[in-house]
Amino acid sequence: MKIIADFHIHSKYSRATSRQMEVETVALWAEKKGIDLLGTGDFTHPQYFAELQGALAPLGNGFFKLKSRPSPVHFILTVEVSNIFSVKGAVKRIHTIIFAPSFETAQKINSQLSRLGKLGSDGRPIFGFHVKDIVKIALDASADCLIVPAHAWTPWFSVFGSNSGFDSIEECFEEQAKNIFAIETGLSSDPAMNWRLSGLDRITLLSNSDSHSPSRIGREANVFDCEMDYFEIVRAIREKDRKKILHTIEFFPEEGKYHYDGHRVCDLVLPPRESKKLNKVCPRCGKKLTIGVLHRVEDLADRPEGFRPEDPVPFKNMIPLDEILADALGQNVGTKAVDQAYETMVKQIGPELSILFDRSREELAAVSGERVVDGILRVREGRVEIKPGYDGVYGKIKVFKEEEKPAASSKRQMEFF
């Protein structure tokens, strides 16, 4: 069966996260998005863990469902953990995602980690020990746990981060590297960028939303063809099974907030070739530039741009539906007009990801105006304009050019909704 999975989200107990990030609400949004399998996030937080136990019923296959009502959404226990530690005088900051097959296993992990840090201070707990030890703690709790380096290229908190990471999985995880089977590519990179590193050939590339608010669930995801079973999906990831892993769903990486180099304070954004000429120093203030994902990939790559391995897991780029609607209607994301158009489309023809990838022009035109249909089809074909993100600032993607902006016609567009 086809399964669309988003393994990495956060709860309301994580910093800078919406208060709506609780089980019932994220389940509703997963249904709107078309997500079949959703990570819980934050299972180490004591209060949230208790809420999960009260809200979710185990199915006996490593997954869970809501107790309160029927829902097609399945849940998997996940948490993102932060390790900040020093190696040879250099501070390293690595985030990893832990997958657990049961409440019992999660409780074992929580019990061990509670002795090493304060689990209640944040949904994404912070520890001062080496990241390789988080792998051992998880696998000691259960050999069925999976540990995945999160947003692997983010400059500040990742395995390959330009400011606090390493140059390889082996260098980072040392003797535990053999137990790392996948990485999360993150919003600012896509599989094509990762294919340039031969050291990642054995690694499964996963994509998740890392959502901090309900509407951002599913902005990146993974598509499987297998049984709805924790052990089957973990096996497919560990073995990089091309028959079971169909493709990933990706942001255009330029839209991610660390794609290019730059300095947010000085409103300066640069491609790698330009920042190299400047020795990675901001010409406006003299401070070090934040080196983005594209630059970091080029530093570590041993293959040319455009390299494609034999029979890779493919990927599809997307722009969230509300962003397409906002551009098509000449409105801002979050406005009443855009929200109304979004809800109408989802209710009438199906979940967001189905609208973005599967529905025909005729099906789309039955519930939306020509401009909206054109916008969705342009995104499918990659016909978009992108201003890359940098130093924590999201990139800006335009489906329509300035000269195509709606004027009076935008009013007529709204009549379709």
Image (spheres, grey):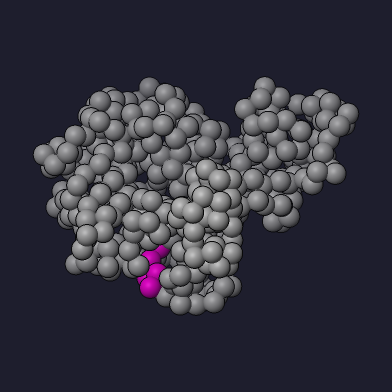
Quadrant containing the C terminus is top right
Residue at the outermost left position: 115
Residue 233 is one of the magenta-drawn residues: no
265 or 341, which is in the foreground? 265
Q: Is residue 27 above or below residue 358?
A: above
Q: Is residue 176 above or below residue 362?
A: below
Q: Provide residue 282's location: percent of width, then percent of height.
A: 52, 55
Residue 376: name its quadrant: top right
Residue 396: name its quadrant: top right
Instruction: Using residue 365 as the reference point, say whether residue 142 is left or right of it.
Output: left
Residue 233 visible to the viewer = no
Instruction: Using residue 386 as the reference point, say whether residue 27 is left or right of it.
Output: left
Q: Provide residue 336's location: percent of width, then percent of height.
A: 67, 22
Q: Is residue 310 above or below residue 296?
A: below
Q: Residue at position x 33%, y 68% from top?
A: 168
Segment colored magenta: 199-204
Q: Provide residue 179's location: percent of width, then percent of height.
A: 25, 63
| Numbered marks: total | 0
Q: Residue at position x 43%, y 60% from top?
A: 205
Instruction: Using residue 296 as the reference point, say whether residue 124 is left or right of it.
Output: left
Q: Residue at position x 69%, y 40% from top?
A: 324
Residue 407 visible to the viewer = yes
174 or 363, which is in the foreground? 174
408 or 180, which is in the foreground? 408
Q: Provide residue 382's location: percent of width, then percent of height.
A: 69, 56
Residue at the outermost right position: 408
Residue 200 is one of the magenta-drawn residues: yes
Q: Residue at position x 64%, y 31% from top?
A: 333
